[in-house]
Amino acid sequence: MKAVSVVLRAAVALWFGLGPGSAGALGAEPLTALARPDLGASSLDDLKGGGVALSLGLSQPVPYRVFTLNAPPRLVVDFREVDWRGSDPAALTGSARVRSVRAGAIRPGWSRLVLELSAPMALVSAEMPRDPATGRARLALQLFPAAAGTEGTERPPAQTALWGLPEPEKLAPPPRRHDGSRALRVVIDPGHGGIDPGAESAGIREADLMLTFGRELAEALARAGIEPVLTRNADVFVPLETRIDIARAARADVFLSLHADALADGYASGATVYTLSETASDSASARLAERHDRDALLAGVDLSDQDDVIAGVLMDLARTDTQPRSDRLAEAIVAGLRGHVGHLYKTPHMSAAFSVLKSPDIPSVLIETGFLSSADDRERLISPEWRARAAAGIVEALRGWAEADAAAAALLRR
């Protein structure tokens, strides 16, 4: 749309030192250092006519792009080289038309600011003037209610040289099912990260805790002769679909997604292992899957594209072989955790429509290691000794499952 193209032009102009209000002064000062937000010099206000104005102070101008998304309605701003560490974007208050604000890393060299809006809005203006005296900059945006019938028409801008085009994908031949003749390759997926911290309780963030456990599990797997691959090894945001792409690119034999959620109401405690199902085991599992996807949405992801019907049919056919293997893997991990840590959820093997488990050709499970909303679980999860026992249980489960799965594959070949 026009507003998006205007902002992209503005961002490209900034990249070459010709940003609005700079009078070309940037040309002599290449952008090499990280910029930092100045929330004390920032504001978020309602405008007459139903609009919203954002003024964000920055220590220096940076390339940026901005767009809107719907379902839920959001404003998304991507920045090159803005470091949000130590800043609380939730401090940007003053607008009754903005439900929440979040910010964080989105990919190497880029961060993202997301405003969840109370209703669909259109971007009217965007500029980043620079103060010649101080070198500081200010991002100024204005939004107004979207015209009737235009909701949902905007999409993220196309990839550009500024954002960084990916290399053309080289497709390898389909991997052979693991038969025991090589090391088992396991992709470990620490949930959330970057702009998406996941559950938070008592000062503990799910994203940080699962990254720690993911690294520890990777070390335990390597010591056992199993090849680990991490979908992230830092506090960065990785979209759900990209996590599956990483597993496929790694030619994974197994995909393990690690989480530790929190419940707003009720009480739950203990580890749970989830497999994929369009019909959730219970209402709590359904809400949990919805929350995981909603976290991705609120991080500025567009999930509006529909799956190709034929591709969907082919994936369902592939899952007729993969799903029973995933179920057996889940049962093995339940047994391994029970033997090493003891305390599990009352129904330790459950199912729900987690998007991250939808790879049709890789046995995949999601391990809820515990609930941050439970004081007992928090105490266990922050204990290195408990995590080491949990990792040992998962390693034992993978070794037993891989041996049985390889034997089943040999029978199929016969």
Image: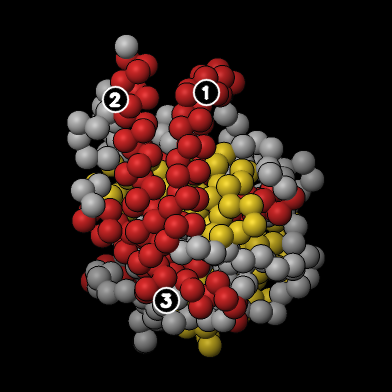
Q: Residue at x 42, y 29 (%)?
A: 361
Nearest to N terminus: mark 1 or mark 2: 2
| Three-letter residue code for mark 2 | Arg
- Secondary structure beneath label 1: helix
Mark 3 neighbour class, 10 Å CA radius: few under 14, some 14 to 19, many 20 or more: few
Q: Residue at x 25, y 71 (%)?
A: 32
Q: Residue at x 67, y 51 (%)?
A: 285
Q: Is residue 236 above or below residue 58?
A: above
Q: Position of residue 242 (x, y in %)?
A: 42, 45
Res. 176 mark: 2
Q: Position of residue 256 (x, y in %)?
A: 42, 48
Q: Position of residue 177 (x, y in %)?
A: 32, 27
Q: Which residue is mark 1?
A: 320
Question: Hey, which quadrant is residue 198 in on the image?
Answer: bottom right
Question: Closer to the observer: label 1 or label 3?
Answer: 3
Q: Is residue 329 visible?
A: yes
Q: Is residue 299 left or right of residue 150?
A: left
Q: Which residue is mark 3?
A: 383
- Secondary structure beneath label 3: loop
Nearest to N terminus: mark 3 or mark 2: 2
